[in-house]
Amino acid sequence: MNLILLFDDDFIDASRVRLTGRRLRHVTEVHRAAVGESLVVGIANGRIGRGTITRLDSESLEMDVSLDRDPPAALPLTLILALPRPKVLNRVIAGAASLGIKRIVLINAWRVEKSYWSSPRLSAENLRAQAILGLEQARDTVLPSIETRRLFRPFVEDELGAIAHGTRALVAHPHAREACPRDVREPVTLVIGPEGGFIEAEIVSLERIGFMPVTIGERILRVETAVPYLAARLY
């Protein structure tokens, strides 16, 4: 945890917080901090600064907090992601949040197993928890929007065009002819398919609304590798 993320209900007055649970354990067991030491903190969707520990015991810690700088700039990338296997979903969400991606839409596709949609890892509580882990890693505070769409065709036909409006619209596809661009200077809406890729009909429907299929070469990457690779290549 490179930043302790604070929330409004942590504050016991205007500049003092009280923490328990996971964050308390991390401070005592990982940072091994003591009264008088200061740690990097940030308020959710707000500024970053330092928190000086004023009280610490096995039940809670209190810090005096001063916030004096803005969080890092968001990555201008909207990620449309075919729902991955539940056992990798946590890593993908945490990784995307740590990269600064602020809008993620998890969608269905022909090759997405129906059982994935019933996984408890898809709960709003778990997705938020994974996003928080990513922000703490990257010293960011701005929580991403994470949405789900279980019907591919209505989403593509009715919503995706508006989401991608004013951005460069790309879909990662192993069989594309065009290479994924580098060092893009504009916002991007990036669609990444499931393991095995999108079927041809899905690619055609994405092309119909202006998405260009792009490839990253001969290597076929797992989604948890493809997301950071593509984000780094684009920006």
Image: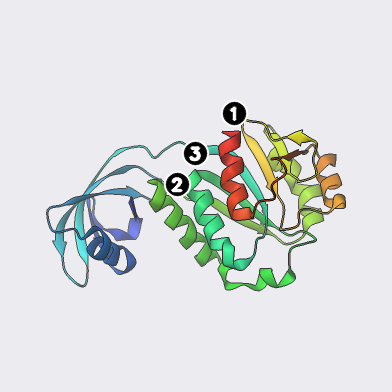
Position of residue 16 in the picture relative to residue 72 (left or right): left
Position of residue 101 in the picture relative to residue 215 (left or right): left
> Gap in Å between the C-alphas at discs 3 and 2?
8 Å
Front of the two marks 1 and 2: 1
> Gap in Å between the C-alphas at discs 1 and 2?
24 Å
Q: For residue 74, which numbered disc appears in the image? A: 3
**Mark 1 touching mark 2, by CB under 8 A?**
no
What's the amino acid at mark 1?
A: Asp
- Locate residue 66, reporting x and y percent: 23, 44
Estimate how packed mark 1 is, as few (under 14), some (14 to 19) or many (20 or more) residues with alpha carbons within 10 Å: few
Residue drawn at (64%, 65%) of the image = 85
Pointer 2 residue: 142
- Locate residue 75, reporting x and y percent: 53, 38
Q: Describe the element under mark 1 as helix, strand or loop.
A: loop
Q: Relative to 225, does residue 186 appear above or below in the rendering?
A: above
- Closer to the chain start, of discs 1 and 2, is 2
Quarter of the image containing the C terminus?
Answer: top right
What's the amino acid at mark 3?
A: Ala
Residue 138 visible in the shown view: yes
- Closer to the chain start, of discs 3 and 2, is 3
Position of residue 37 in the picture relative to residue 42 (left or right): left
Q: Residue furthest top?
A: 185
Front of the two marks 1 and 3: 1
- Locate residue 162, reporting x and y percent: 72, 41
Q: Describe the element under mark 2 as helix, strand or loop.
A: loop
What's the amino acid at mark 2?
A: Val
Q: Describe the element under mark 3 as helix, strand or loop.
A: loop
